[in-house]
Each structure stands twice: as structure tokens, then as C-alpha cells.
Image: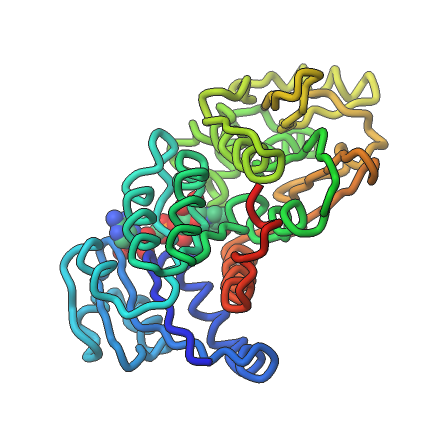
Amino acid sequence: MQFNVALLGFGNVGRALAELIMRKRDTLRETYDLDVRVVGISTGRHGKVIDEDGLDLAAALETWRAGGSLAEMGQGRAVETNEQFIAECPADLVFETIPTNPESGQPALDYARAILSRGIHYVTANKGPVAFGYRELRALAAQNDVGFFFESTVMDGGPVLSVGREGLPTLQVNRIRGIFNSTTNYILTRMEEDGLTFDEALRKAQEIGIAETDPTLDIDGWDAAIKTVIVANVIMGADLRPADVNREGIRGLALEEVRAAEADGQRIRLMCMAERTDTGEVRATVRPERVPIGSVLAGIKGTTGIVEFETDVLPRLTILEHDPGPPTTAYGMLADMINLARGRHRDGVVLR
Ligand SMILES: NC(=O)c1ccc[n+]([C@@H]2O[C@H](COP(=O)([O-])OP(=O)(O)OC[C@H]3O[C@@H](n4cnc5c(N)ncnc54)[C@H](OP(=O)(O)O)[C@@H]3O)[C@@H](O)[C@H]2O)c1
């Protein structure tokens, strides 16, 4: 089956996805009967191009590396705006990887609406549209008989949402706990292992490219809160927004507190939790917590992530993901594509 895809965003994740599509081309064809053709790429500052006949991905990557514009690489036709790109691109699926807006999910939320309304599958790694528009976009996708999948928004492509969605049929998920923010976990690990102060550990995270120049989203717990909202809404049927999360970050955590915890046989971790209360409501919290040194949670170091599901039958199921990054995030998107091409969005279990 010929499957036409478009890339809205061609940054770290978008390019990793282009590389993965090239690397897995034969497997996709032989095992999944998918002949994937990239018919459009849209960027912020590196041009926007549509080519019905399929773009040469290696040439697109080369153009990007050379600092050129994709609109001028001698293939297809240039378009000016994302609205035009979405309206005219002959894609079966759009992969969206533009920056996350933690305050409103925009403009990606509007792009998602336009993509799904055109009857095109929408796969995103961007947490914004999911945290702010999950129910609406899910309904819009169903109305147009297409899919809206976003595996890569939590734990960078590890199969967390698909396990919650499809791997736990009939179970009641009572609690989801995890460490979802790798920057803060990296900072805590450097404080524990290297004796760095919070500011020194943050600088180190910035030097190696894990933390942004403005680290607010990570250290104040917003990124963790957004991911907690996604798992709560998608897997536990909640209807929360990031502002509903009882949130505390680790900004300015004193090295003495890390040492005091250690002296008590504990480590500090920025824990994310969504929990069903006695009244059936789902409450979400993000806050630094002490965990016993010998526990699995204390063993989560650096950028590793973890999620634990507690259900009415399986007492505790844990998924751990080591070394996340753009390639793992791209993998979650590729897996979403395969599931959509197989029609998994029509399975009732997908929608809670
Ligand atoms: N990096 C990860 O490992 C990771 C993991 C999980 C989720 N995510 C999420 O995935 C998304 C992408 O992350 P990334 O690391 O790839 O970011 P990135 O390197 O900053 O790339 C963002 C891309 O979006 C483009 N862009 C920006 N504004 C745009 C607009 N209005 N229209 C079209 N394109 C636009 C940029 O183009 P120009 O560069 O030409 O301006 C660039 O190609 C983010 O939402 C992030 O939160 C990332």
C-alpha cells in the first residue's frame, strides 16, 4: 500500500524520523506492506515544500545540514504558510513536530484541527495539542474516520500510551506513577553523584543540551505536569488541564536536602502521579518526593524514564526507558503510523 506522509516540523525529531523512515523502508514494505512516500516538509525557517511524487529524504537532510531552504532544493513546489501546506499537501498522514506551547498548545492545536478535518491522520510528538485538546481532537478524528496518535509525547517514544490503551483491556487503572522529566532527573543525579549544587547541575544539563536556556518548563514541573495530564486523560479517562495539576518543581533545591535524604537512606525524585480517588475522580500531582535508596525509583538515574501502572488485577506493571532522545521519539511516531495504517484507530479500546 502506498502511504503518503508529510512532516510538519523538521527539527531534531523530524529529521530523526526522516532517517528512521529511510532505515526501515524495506521492513515497512516487506512486513507491513507500506510503501512510505514523503510528499511534503514544512519548517519554520528552512522553507516549506510539497511534492506529490515524493521528496528525496536524503537530499532534504543534506539541504538542511547545509543551511539551505527546502523550498529551493529543486524538488516540488514551495508553499508559504502552514495553513496552505495542510490544505494542499496530498498526505494520508501528517507527522507534527513543532515546538510545544505549554500555555495553550497553539498554533499546533489549530493545525491538528485542520489536518483531522481534512480527513488526514495526525501523529504528533508535541504535547501541547494533546494536553489542551485531547477530547476534541479525538472526536474530530473519529468523525473523519482517521486517527490521532501521540505515543511520543510521554517517555519519548517508549510504548506507554499504547500499553495503557490496548494492553490492559477491562482493567481499571487506579494509579499511574512515574518519572517523566529527564532534565530534572539528570539534575538530581548530578547533585547526588557529583555533589554539584542545583545551579551547577542545571548548567551542566544546559551544556550538554538536555536543558533549555530557559529551564522554567522543566524545573518548575510544567513539562512533567503536561505529561501527567496526558496519561491521566488518555489512560484513566480524566479531563484535566496542566493548570489542574497540583505542581511543585525542584527549582533551587539545596544540596543539603539531597544529602539529608541520602543520610536517611533515601533519594529525591520528581514524581508524577495520577490517582483515582474514592469518588472516582482523578487527581494529578507533580512534586519532589523521597524514595528509599534500594527502590526501583531511586535507581532511575540521568535521563532514564519510568512509568508504573497500578490496576485492579495486575497490581503493578512497570515500563522503564533508557537513553531517550530524538531517535526514540521518532520511533514512537513510526509505530503510531504503522498502527494507523493497520486501522487501529477504529478499535474501540483506543478511545477511553
Ligand atoms: N527532542 C526530543 O527528544 C523530544 C522528545 C519528545 C517530544 N518532543 C517534542 O517534539 C517536538 C519537536 O522537538 P524537536 O526537538 O525536534 O524541536 P526542534 O529541534 O526545535 O524542531 C522544531 C521544528 O519545528 C519547526 N517549526 C517551528 N515553528 C514552526 C512553525 N510555526 N511551522 C512549521 N515548522 C515550525 C522548526 O523549523 P526551523 O528550525 O526551520 O525554525 C523545526 O524544524 C516538540 O514539541 C518537543 O516538545 C521532543
Seen at 52% across and 51% down, the residue is 152
Is residue 131 toward the left or the right of residue 24 in the image?
Answer: left
Is residue 305 toward the left or the right of residue 19 in the image?
Answer: right
Seen at 44% across and 51% down, the residue is 142
Seen at 16% across and 68% down, the residue is 78
Mark count: 0
Q: What is the quadrant of residue 30 in the picture? A: bottom right
Q: Which residue is at the front of the view, 24 or 232?
A: 232
Q: What is the quadrant of residue 66 in the picture? A: bottom left
Percent across and percent down for residue 332 are 55, 57
Vertical placement of residue 220 versus 180, above or below: above
Q: Which residue is at the front of the view, 288 or 115?
A: 115
Percent across and percent down for residue 68 are 22, 67
Vertical placement of residue 205 versus 32, above or below: above
Vertical placement of residue 127 versus 324, above or below: above
Q: What is the quadrant of residue 10 in the picture? A: bottom left
Percent across and percent down for residue 251 are 51, 21
Quarter of the image for the C terminus: give it.
top right
Seen at 49% across and 32% down, the residue is 226
Is residue 24 toward the left or the right of residue 88 in the image?
Answer: right
Q: Which colour scheme appears in the figure?
A: rainbow
Percent across and percent down for residue 33 are 54, 81
